Image (spheres, helix red, strand yellow):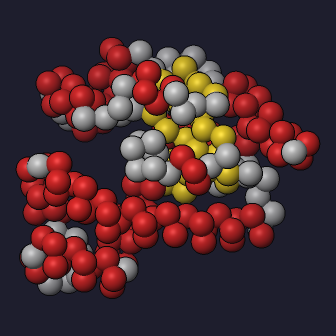
Amino acid sequence: MRIGLTGGIGAGKSYVSRLLTAECGIPVYDCDREAKRLMTASPAIQQQLRALVGTEAYLPDGELNKPLMAAYLFTNEEHQKAVNAIVHPAVRADFKRWAAEQEQAGAPAVAIESAILVEAGFTDLAEKIIVVEAPLSLRLQRVMQRDGATEQQVRARMARQLSDEERRQAADFIIENDGRDITEQLKHYTSTIIQQKHHA
């Protein structure tokens, strides 16, 4: 059984991810982290990004030139689409490989975590989708504290993401991460998902 985990910035996806592994025994594939790893580790991606952005896309030591890439990505949406067209297929293939390994090792289920699960077209990689939500004020506070960003900066980042309503359309389960303990709710959802698989 493969579970998709998504939510807006500051909703607390990473927290829910950690709970999934610690409390439910479900390994989680973090798309953001793995995409960054693949951008450095994959010769094919390096070659394509150098062709797209320029040879300066990578530093002499082979690491990604993050300030340059960030500047390139944020100048316009077409740039973002072009980079995503290189990175997303690699992430998709890497998740499938990883998920098969985890399942062979006996994991009861696996999860894929991505802020842009819906936008990236990754929802078909999961049989059930959990959407993490939180009140706007709490989300703003979390991200401002975490990233040292201003409220305007955080709101601008939120505006580039899907709304809660749009994400909800893809959801099988919704977790309201408003500061209360969500462990039992999450355990209930995951056991329901795993049982459904056994009955299917």
Q: Which residue is located at x 83 percent, y 45 percent?
A: 197
> What is the count of numbered marks?
0
Q: Is residue 91 left or right of residue 29?
A: left
Q: Can I make out residue 59 in this image?
A: no
- The answer to which image quadrant residue 175 occupies is top right
Nearest the viewer among 126 and 184 is 126
Q: Which residue is located at x 29 percent, y 22 percent?
A: 140
Q: Where is residue 30 in the image (x, y as percent from the top left)?
A: 49, 54
Q: In this view, does 57 lie to the left or right of 17?
A: left
Q: Is residue 124 above or below residue 177?
A: below
Q: Position of residue 44 (x, y in %)?
A: 33, 82
Q: In this view, does 35 lie above or below 110?
A: below
Q: Which residue is located at x 77 percent, y 38 percent?
A: 193
Q: Where is residue 168 in the image (x, y as percent from the top left)?
A: 51, 26
- The answer to which image quadrant residue 116 occupies is top left
Q: Which residue is located at x 20 percent, y 83 percent?
A: 61
Q: In this view, does 71 lie to the left or right of 99?
A: left
Q: Can I make out residue 143 in this image?
A: yes
- Spot the residue most to the right: 199
Specify the quadrant that holds the C terminus: top right
Q: In this view, does 27 lie above or below 8?
A: below
Q: Position of residue 78 (x, y in %)?
A: 17, 54
- The answer to which image quadrant residue 58 occupies is bottom left
